[in-house]
Image (tube, coloured by chain):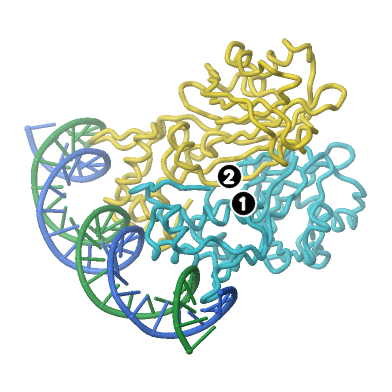
Chain colours: A yellow, B cyan, C blue, D green
Amino acid sequence: MTVSKDVSGGVALWRQIADAIRLDIVGGKLASGDRLATEAVLAERFSANRHTVRRALAVLAEEGVVGAEQGRGTFVRSARRLSYPIGRRTRFREGLRGQADSLTSYSLSDRIENATATIAAALGLKPGAKVVRTEGLSIADGRPISRSTTWLSYRLFPDFAERIARLQSTTEVFASYGIVDYARASTRISARHADVEETKLLGLSPGAILLVSEAVDVDSSGIPISYALSRFPAERMELVV
Amino acid sequence: MTVSKDVSGGVALWRQIADAIRLDIVGGKLASGDRLATEAVLAERFSANRHTVRRALAVLAEEGVVGAEQGRGTFVRSARRLSYPIGRRTRFREGLRGQADSLTSYSLSDRIENATATIAAALGLKPGAKVVRTEGLSIADGRPISRSTTWLSYRLFPDFAERIARLQSTTEVFASYGIVDYARASTRISARHADVEETKLLGLSPGAILLVSEAVDVDSSGIPISYALSRFPAERMELVV
DNA sequence: TCGATTTGTCTAATAGAATAGACAACTATT
DNA sequence: AATAGTTGTCTATTCTATTAGACAAATCGA
């Protein structure tokens, strides 16, 4: 993609250039191993100075997206986006199977709290009811791909936090409670910039974009069992409905 | 939301502050008519200078999101995000009915071209087959909410462009071809920054985020009829699956 | 081995981002 | 009418972003 110079828009030119090149890579226009245009050509394409382009490339190199080799050129290192299928039967680990060699999920923290109006409504509880809240992070092939916060009824799942820390998979934890099947009731998708904590945890550069999904899962009889707020780096994941 | 100072990240502090305040507004934390915190308070909250906050507020005022009144304070002007429901039976105009008073769609341009590999695959055509491409823009209550590009088989819909310009509604155009019902086969959702043309057409400020949906619609016998690439400003729209 | 091409490093100059302080103009309350 | 609180405007200073030019260091093919 070509970005015209967008002076004084509050976004530095080198960042716009980095975003544009990254988009070409994760969008599939540039494949792994391809050589990028030379710095001089890129500078002309973006109507910028070569030093500005170099700064953009330095950011992408730090992210592991490209690698420069003196005398040869700059080459694409990373792969394209993962696709996370979302439907009535949405399973995180199943959906990504085959797209990554390794998929690890971490529990960052958990606590018992009182449901806000939003969460109570989603889970069909009274506002202020006790809920379990767990913070998680998922990593595919060494790259963080999701940062999620999940709320569940404390009455139904008092020790959810312990179990998810042990089993990693939400599906298996539900199974351990005797819930053999569950379905996605609703998914609300938005997008925004990552805040500072998310930027750090997901290993992003400042200003990165997150796809945000608010999902409610229900058991086979239609009773809400979990409300999850997941943040996916838009440069690493796309959602397929 | 609180944004810690994020020095040298390539995104100006005044823009980060504007984005954070806009997110509070479109996310529903601040309702229309509410008074914002004073500039001095905001400056402290974001660990920034009052002048920097003023610059952020100036941007939001230009967008029509807030309005400052000397001696009184700064007030929220705009409404929250629209929700676009996506499912097997996805209809743009129906989905937004009741959320906006007016909904107008414009045809910007159209042309006949040869299908790329991606488009041919989506429409079940041979690469290079003739397709109709139309560019559109939709505006709700005076605010642009989507910029879309649609491809259709030229053989099946040779004068699609004329009809959409006249009827505005895709559903009605399909009906005029005798397609009484159609369904959404797949929707691929990603997010990225708006480019310069999109920024201008959608009336956004530079660096704004777009939700991007790639959708394939099929007729009642499962034959693909359209491939649409729609870009929604993340600050004005969310997608509900 | 030579020459062309490409990335790496250095210095320097100019425009924009952010901070700091002071005071004017306006509003609402007492 | 007086006062406190708020937005509007001005000047000045420091740090970053961007441009510009020059040359070194590495690679590759003729």
Instruction: Name the chain under label 2.
Output: B
Q: Quadrant of residue A127?
A: top right
How far across and down, in percent of the image, does residue B28 sit?
A: 66, 52
Tell me the quadrant of the picture where the C terminus of chain B can be found: top right
Amino acid carrying mark 1 in the image: Ala
Of residues B188 and C4, the one nearer the viewer is B188
Marking on residue A194: none
Q: Name the residue under label 2.
A: B191
Label 1 SS = loop
The residue under the point 37% across, 50% down is B10
Residues at marks 1 and 2, CA–CA distance in whole angstroms: 8 Å
Q: Position of residue B59 (x, y in %)?
A: 50, 66
The answer to whether residue C19 is above or below residue B192 is below
Asked whether the beta carbons under mark 1 and mark 2 sit within 8 Å of each other, the answer is yes
- Give whichever of B1, B55 is nearer the camera: B1
Position in image of residue B209 (x %, y %)? 55, 51
Residue at image point 34% right, 48% down? B7
Bin the neighbour count of mark 2 within 10 Å (Cα to Cα): few under 14, some 14-19, many 20 and up. many
B29 left or right of A24 in image: right
**Which mark, residue B234?**
1
Q: Residue at x 63, y 20 (%)?
A: A93
Crowding near the residue tagged with mark 1, few <14, some 14–19, many ≥20 C-alpha atoms within 10 Å: many
* Amino acid under disc 2: Ala
Q: How many marks?
A: 2
Q: Which residue is painted at 47% across and 32% down in the image?
A: A202
**In front of the other: D4 or A84:** D4
**Above-or-below relation of B133 to B104:** above
Label 1 vs 2, first from the N-terminus: 2
Q: Can you give x and y, in whole percent of width and height, for residue A238 in the image?
A: 60, 36
> Helix or strand or loop: what does disc 2 sit on?
strand
* Chain on which label 1 sits: B
Is the residue B177 above or below the residue A69 in the image? below
